[in-house]
Image (cartoon, rainbow, N blue to C red):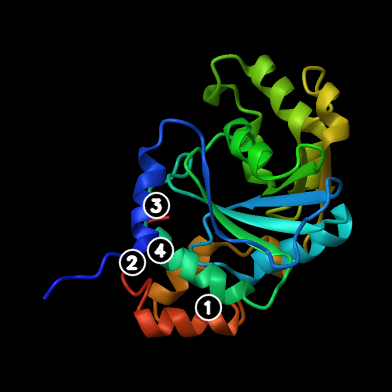
Amino acid sequence: MSIKPNPLLQQIEQLRRLKESSVLLVRKAPQGISQKRGHLGIFPASFNPPTRAHLALIRKARRWGHLDEVLVLLDAQAMDKKIIGADLEDRVIMLKRLFQRDPKVSIGISNRGLFVEKMVPLKRMYPSSLSFIFIVGFDTILRVMDKRYYSNLDETLDMLFGLCEFLVANRSGKEEHSFEELFGRGENLRYRDKVSFITLPPRFSFLSSSLVRKLIAKGQPVDNWVAASILRFIEETGLYKKRYPR
């Protein structure tokens, strides 16, 4: 008996093999951006699994940034992380279930980790006249500003902040001060008008996908931390029952 090929898996493998930076769009927002002006929010994260914190951040970013569409973006291979827990196919399924009734959310997969590289295909996929706004946590903006990831830090950051802006959310209770300190430094002052800090309630700012995975592995309930559609999928598939590293 022959096994029917999985189109999504084939597309992901093709994406990984590409030498140029590319984004695979697996869901286009039915009522997303259609004009040459507007605000596109780009939310790159592991979504392993998607949590209520992800949803809270999208809601807050939409209001704050007046976003006309949000692109939730998985990495085919994330920076500094191995793919553990759910594979990309399962994460895509979870995201589709989570946002199936939201007409303004698109879902994509990127084959590059650096934000400046992600912008290359996004500028092709969307009108270049849009405002491109990345939605990230404070831990991520620290990596964006870290010279370890670039051969030429100043040149790359100048290019990046010339193409997009950032909405930065707290991941704990005291990060706004650290954010202001980071962008108050002389070398970062020129980027200050391209970044904004938004605050999530404590019940969300301390919530992470890794915490949810650990709770599931221990057999503890996660009803309060993931949407019902995600919980059903996890229960149906038995995801995260085994103990995984962070």
**Is the residue marked by circle 2 packed among few (<14), some (14-19), or many (20+) residues within 10 Å?**
few
- Measured Cα–Cα span from mark 2 to mark 4: 20 Å
Q: Do the residues labelled 2 and 4 touch (CB within 8 Å)?
A: no
* Residue 108 picture location, percent across and down: 56, 54
- Measured Cα–Cα span from mark 4 to mark 1: 14 Å
- Upstream in sequence: badge 2 or badge 1: 1
> Label 4 is placed on what type of residue?
Glu
Q: What element carries label 1?
A: helix
- Upstream in sequence: badge 2 or badge 3: 3
The residue beneath circle 2 is 243
**Is the residue marked by circle 1 packed among few (<14), some (14-19), or many (20+) residues within 10 Å?**
many
- Measured Cα–Cα span from mark 1 to mark 3: 22 Å
Q: Residue at x 84, y 43 (%)?
A: 196
Q: What element carries label 2?
A: loop
The residue beneath circle 1 is 230
> Label 2 is placed on what type of residue?
Arg
The residue beneath circle 3 is 12
Give the label, 2 or 3, closer to the camera: 3
- Upstream in sequence: badge 3 or badge 4: 3
Q: Residue at x 82, y 56 (%)?
A: 67
